[in-house]
């Protein structure tokens, strides 16, 4: 038996040395180590030996097994290297083939615009303040100087929840109240923040109106803030966002929470004010509602309007993104269609 083991050992080693391919390697493994392989069977037959020979045979059999396994592993490495060398020589592996590009994610166009806004406003000292999307009626309307049943409420059709007085904010302006109350330290500290975030309106969804969209509110409170500061600040924003020679104009308007109120237009960057389809032949595009914070709103935020003043504005980043990229339908923004999203 021991002799048989030794000759099998030599035979297996010899056979291994002659192997140069993966298939032959697998055959060898089956022949010696498979269920009915030579080494396997020999080891199994240890029981047939006389008792006193078993220990010595078992010991040697284990040595042979370990040695063959090691030899096999070594050969496997060698065969791998040989096959690779052969492939390279025969040109089966084309090392000049360019790698496959990995699909990468990207930022949503609205997010890109929001970040651009934040970057521009940060340069002028405006920090980001996050306010809630689920609001109460008081903060969304009342404290912003919308009395109950005031017709201005109709400008913003509201999603109400089943809980009385709780609604989805229709604009980011309620964040003005929260920012003043939280950051103002009882009306003693100046404030300079932007408030970006989603707002909701109960409206028919069309190419031009969605039930949800982002707004970026701006709020500056200080001791000597004037309308001139508001106009200069917005004009600077327009130059940063729309280009160095962007012109703006201010039109008188109305919001309950600002007095005086205005709307801001930027000269159409597509036609340079000549009039085109995008600006509907007006030469101007509306980019913001704005105004001086109403004294009632300052008071509701904890400030004494005799000492403090401030300005506020509200912008629509989706609209700005549409104008910038010539997007004609706002529904693309939340449609999650990759053919749209991958263009940005
Ligand atoms: N909240 C207003 C709107 O949604 C925009 C606005 C903000 C106007 C701040 C003036 C000041 O239409």
Image (cartoon, rainbow, N blue to C red):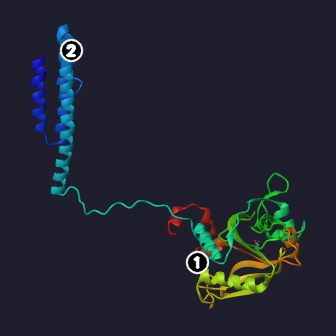
Task: Pick whichever of labels 1 and 2 is earlier in the sequence.
Answer: 2
- 277 w.r.t. 102: above or below: below
Q: Quadrant of residue 274?
A: bottom right
Residue 169's place in the image compared with 151, above or below, is above
| In the depicted structure, whether residue 150 falls above or below residue 87 | below
Left-right relation of 279 to 39: right
Extreme bottom residue here? 274
Which class describes the residues within 10 Å of circle 2: few (<14), some (14-19), or many (20+)?
few
10 Å crowding of disc 1: few (<14), some (14-19), many (20+):
few
Left or right of residue 54, residue 207 in this image: right
Q: CA distance from mark 1 to mark 2?
A: 86 Å
Residue 115 visible from this viewpoint? yes
In this rendering, position of residue 93 left or right of residue 226: left
- Tag 2 secondary structure: helix
| Quadrant containing the N terminus in the rendered view | top left
Q: Which disc number belongs to residue 265?
A: none
Quarter occupied by residue 227: bottom right
In the picture of the structure, the residue carrying the numbered disc 2 is 55
Residue topped by disc 1: 324
The answer to whether the residue bearing label 1 lies less than 8 angstroms from the nearest atom of ligand 1 is: no
Give the percent coordinates (x, y) of residue 279: 64, 83
Residue 34 drawn at (x, y percent) = 22, 27
Q: What residue appears at the point 16 percent right and 48 percent down from the top-left corner?
A: 82
Quadrant hosting ligand 1: bottom right
Q: Nearer the viewer, residue 140 or 59?
A: 59
Q: Is the Cβ of the residue at disc 1 closer than 8 Å to that at disc 2?
A: no
Rendering coords of residue 107 (x, y %):
54, 65
């Amino acid at each position: 038996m021991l002799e048989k083991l030794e000759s099998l050992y030599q035979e297996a080693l010899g056979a291994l040395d002659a192997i140069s391919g993966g298939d032959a390697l697998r055959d060898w493994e089956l022949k010696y180590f498979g269920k009915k392989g030579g080494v396997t069977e020999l080891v199994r037959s240890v029981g047939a030996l006389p008792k006193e020979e078993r220990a010595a045979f078992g010991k040697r059999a284990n040595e042979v097994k370990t040695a063959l396994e090691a030899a096999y592993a070594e050969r496997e490495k060698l065969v791998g290297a040989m096959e690779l060398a052969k492939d390279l020589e025969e040109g089966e592996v084309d090392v000049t083939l360019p790698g496959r590009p990995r699909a990468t994610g990207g930022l949503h166009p609205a997010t890109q615009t929001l970040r651009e806004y934040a970057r521009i406003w940060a340069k002028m000292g405006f920090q980001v303040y996050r306010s809630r999307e689920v609001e109460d009626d008081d903060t969304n309307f009342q404290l912003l100087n919308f009395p109950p049943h005031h017709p201005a409420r109709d400008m913003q059709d509201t999603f109400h929840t089943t809980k009385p007085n709780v609604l989805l904010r229709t604009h980011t302006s309620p964040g003005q109240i929260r920012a003043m109350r939280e950051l103002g330290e009882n009306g003693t500290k100046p404030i300079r923040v932007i408030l970006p975030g989603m707002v909701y309106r109960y409206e028919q969804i069309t190419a031009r109106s969605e039930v949800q969209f982002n707004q970026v509110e701006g709020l500056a409170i200080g001791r000597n803030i004037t309308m001139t500061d508001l106009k200069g600040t917005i004009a600077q924003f327009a130059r940063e966002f729309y280009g160095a020679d962007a012109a703006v104009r201010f039109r008188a308007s109305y919001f309950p929470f600002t007095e005086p109120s205005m709307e801001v237009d930027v000269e159409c960057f597509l036609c340079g004010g000549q009039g085109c389809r995008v600006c509907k032949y007006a030469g101007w595009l509306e980019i913001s509602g704005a105004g001086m914070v109403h004294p009632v709103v300052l008071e509701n935020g904890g400030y004494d309007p005799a000492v403090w003043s401030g300005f506020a504005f509200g912008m629509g980043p989706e609209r700005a993104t549409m104008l910038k990229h010539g997007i004609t339908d706002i529904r693309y923004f939340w449609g999650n269609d990759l053919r749209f999203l991958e263009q940005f």
